[in-house]
Amino acid sequence: MDTLLFSLLNGVIYGLLLFMVSAGLTLVFGMMGVLNFAHASFYMLGAYFAYTLQGVLGFGAAVVVAMLLAGGVGAVVERFFLRRVHHHGHAHELLLTFGLSFIVAESIKLLFGNFPVNYQVPAALDGSAFSLGGQQYPLYRLLMGGVALAMFALLYLLLTRTRVGIIVRSAIYRPRMVEALGHNVQFVFMGVFGVGAALAGLAGAIAGAFYTTSPNMALEIGVMVFVVVVVGGLGSLAGAMLASLLIGLLTSLAVGIDHSLADLLGLLGARAWAEGVGGLLTLKLSSLASTLPFALMLLVLLLRPQGLLGDKS
Amino acid sequence: MRTSISLLSGGVALLAVLPFLLSAGLLNAAVQMLIAALFASAYGLLAGRAGMLSFGHAAYFGVGAFATVHGMNALGGTGLLPTPLMPLVGAGAGLAFGVVAGWFATQRSGTAFAMITLAIAELLHSLAPQLKGLFGGESGISTMRMPAWGLNFGSTTQVYYLTLVWVLISLLLLHFHTRTPAGRLTLGLRENSHRLRFLGYDVHRLSVSAFAISGLFSGLAGALQVLANEAANYVVFDPAVSASVVLNSYIGGVGVFLGPALGAALMSFFGYAVSDTTQAWLLYQGVLFVLVMMFMPQGLVGLGGLAVSRVRRLGAARALPLLLAWLLAALLLAAGAVFLVELLQRLCSQDYRTLAAQAQGWPPVNLLDATWDVTSVATWAWPLGLMALGGGLLAFAHKRLRTPEDAA
Amino acid sequence: MSSFRLAALPAALLIASAAHADAVKIGLLETLSGPQASTGQTFRAGVRFAIDKMNAAGGWNGQPVQLVEYDNQGGPAGASDKLKAAIADGVQIVVQGASSAIGGQITEDVRKHNLRNPGKEIVYINVGAEALELTGEKCNFHHFRVAPNAQVRTKVLVKGMKEANALGKKVYSINQNYSWGQDMEAAIVDNAAAGGYQVVEKTLHDTNKIQDFAPYIAKIGSSGAETVLTGNWSNDLLLMMKAAKGAGLKATFGTVFLDQPGNISNAGDTALGHFIVHAFNGEAGGADGERFVADFSAKLGRPPVFVEPQTAFGLDMVADALRRTKPEGGKLNVNAFARAMETARVKTPMGEASMRAADHQILMPLVVSTVTRDARYKVDGTDMGFKPVKVFSAEDAAMPVQASCKMQRPS
């Protein structure tokens, strides 16, 4: 029972971390149609900025400044790089961001080296929140979850209850009309991109201390973030939250399940046959924990291509 | 038309005599370049002509590769399919998988289509290490080219000619496809599939056929790689392989038939040549991608086309020196930037930092077989000066090469 | 055209090298870029150190040994390409260690090349690809593994931890789901009787894909295991230990790759009390050990870490074999070198190491250490280091030849 509770809690927290990173991506995706391969790079940049500034500014301030710096980099990328290739089509934007992700990763390797750097959670936050069944639950994890929830709430309120939010949302659907009404749509795009990057940077600054901070961070979380965005629905914040939680829980719970399809078929009396066939049927679900998100993504794309909570536009 | 045919025949003739001009190591690089060119051309059919951006094309390449390696191990190079005909196995597997995957993927379009292809490739990539029988775990499946038709296929030269023949046949077939009605219709898929539907064509079936043909030739390219390397490994399903074929195609330019092939050959050679020279070669590759995407959206073929159009508009006497100046400027900029990056790389490396800590100062660095004093202005003036010079020359050439038609 | 110029360059090199009384070329075919570059670069550091030492002692055939470096771009296909380039450049000894997948590709390519080109053989010195099959079903006369493997490492780790009373009765085995992890899992189960423990559960997880190890730690906790034995490396090890600390898991970890740079500094105090089996510990080597550390520090500005010592010792063995191989017609006869390598013995600071002719696996001493604050050599800029618990001689560490190895020898 305790294990189940832990698994659920872990799944939720991991899902919230995924949400922090993918929130920005889904907004940018929904608004500009730009598949930003470099989004995970902002995550990594946030972690490295925070690591560099931690000694000078202290953890909290370093995280905030890292977030702003990542946002700044995002705005610069949008203004000077993406805007140039926007009219050439989606493929070019995508490939540009792909090239940028390479540049960021290699520059970080150049400046900080190939090995993980010593970016640690500060001692004040490093305790345990509570104990359950002999195992402790780290305080910092709950903090990460809290920040993600706060981010969700803030973004949601911003988008639905403020004037800026209305402009942003309408720019997603009818950019020309918004422009005709006198708003600076280019600036809105830049702002959204910057905010998306800042959110990813915040996620990186916070998660990098808990997990490892290495030049491969972007690769590790990059593909999963795409899965989240696609499953949730492009442009839908609530969809991203739902999908992140779903995937977090799926991976977390699957680890505990040591059964395979052969066991399921065993219920129907076909176990021996299934084991004879081997291959896919005898693979344990726990070994497939990282494959399940892709299967989910494929399923969603085939059955409901606009995502779970996306709009059929 | 005449010039392009003579250019092409010249190119083929050069390729035919390449083994006599190159060392074995470079000849092997040429084999890989040919394979990459075929893969990119197959991708160009789908992305360039049919307008369907696929992000998981490595799946069809990999399926073709594994089918071929199993075929080689099972048939031993004799009987129905001797070694030179083995790529047909890969082509067949690529076609079959392309039909199945394409049937699902082409039900959606645009971004959803791209994501489906990505998901298929990633699913394969995740499952492959678990399915040892099919994919051989992380050491892959190895095989050996068996002698056939009087040749033993032991030397790189024979492998090169085998690859060359298959690639030329495939490119010819692909080009022929563009001339058929079906090939023309794939253009319609890109331009206006809605209208195509109203004209009475089954758009889904057309899309699947385009996808399947692309899968066929991708599988063939995979088979050729297995013939060259005598092994197949599940890392062939890695997203990086899918991404590299997309990049190669767009760097070459998807508007022209041979564009992707050119881009792939060039980037393949770039990786081969530069990876041993410097540790920061992935950075240079990334910068190259970004620069091409930003300033050469038509790809390198487009660049060639631009140069030709300049010569035509300004006259050869005026245009050629300016083009040369432009090229020189690009080289200077590149040289300066590379110098700077290499300096930085040495300065930030772990070894240098420990040396600096020991010496309590800034020891000199080793670059281009010479030592450079980090604290002196000259060391930094060189790259910055080169870049400034290159930048100025580039601006000058660019301004002079502009014609009134450009503003329109 | 540039292809002519490119063709001329290697030709000129070949002519130039032929003019000399032939130097032997050693090719390093490593992962020098991409995600696993850090490991490849560590192997490279060890190889460079050993080659410099070889040349300081006179090289071979009156000429310094030439080291040529190739970047295999992180994958077996790239390794295959660069191997062909190395052969074309006249390399006769190929060295690699960072990945068992690449090792498998290289050993097969070497075997095929030698089959097709009798008289122009090349040999593969494996300094770190530890998959069992390389000295099992893929064993090959022209492949020499101068690194340990899962079986010997686990045997020594279990013995060492048992003697330090850190093993307990319940052991949890968690490993990566590929050949290395599967080899480790099999070895952990095989050693249960000798170690006097029971394997309460075995887990295989995806390699280098998992960010959140908390579910696995929860499983370990609920199984009641006292010790966790794992062959995980890089992020998989680090994240697992961090998750263990976060959950307050009270198990001792017995590892193989805890000394990878970055692990100790990132794990912090979590690492204290955990065990590792590795090839070298400066504190346990006596005067020889200190001299090795001093030499290495003089050259690279820091003491040797991670795989650098085992690489250096392995190449010492190569140097020993080279010394005993006389040039034939001014060149190195690779088969003669291989025969000399089969009987090679070197004295490492940890004890004597020798090559086993039956499967070309090195028999080398291994040392079990634990992470403490009072170790002599601190790592990663922290105040912690590895303190030796026990050194096991090559005989104690050895495991029998695998039945699947059917080596074909040239006549």
Image (cartoon, coloured by chain):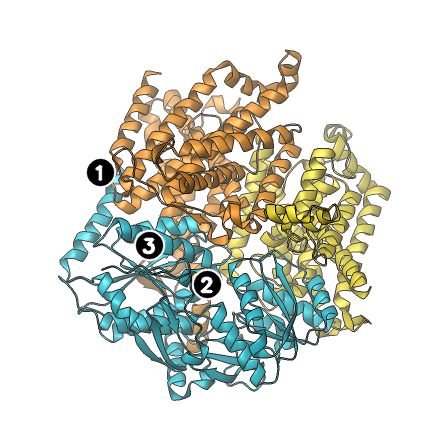
Chain colours: A yellow, B orange, C cyan
Query: Residue B383: where, in percent of width, then height?
Result: 40, 53
Q: CA distance from mark 2 to mark 3?
A: 18 Å
Can residue A193 be spotted in the picture? Answer: no
Residue type, numbered disc 2: Leu
| Image position of B206 with respect to C1: above or below | above
Task: Check the residue under mark 1 and report the chain it is in.
Answer: B
Q: Nearer the viewer, residue C313 or B21?
A: C313
| Image position of A112 with respect to A38: above or below | below
What label sits on residue B20 in the rendered view? 1
Q: Residues within 10 Å of mark 3 (few under 14, many from 20)?
A: many
What label sits on residue C110 in the rendered view? 3
Q: Residue at x 47, y 72 (%)?
A: C152
Residue type, numbered disc 1: Phe
| Image position of C359 with respect to C226: above or below | above
Task: Quadrant for residue B84, please give it.
Answer: top left
**To which residue does mark 2 refer?**
C132
Label 1 residue SS:
helix
Task: Check the residue under mark 2 and report the chain it is in.
Answer: C
Report the quarter where the C terminus of chain C lies: bottom left
Determine if marks 1 and 2 fall on one subunit: no
Label 3 residue SS:
helix
Residue pushed farthest bottom? C287
Task: Check the residue under mark 3 and report the chain it is in.
Answer: C
Query: Residue B312: where, in percent of width, then height?
Result: 37, 21
Point out the tag, 2 or 3, that comes first from the N-terminus: 3
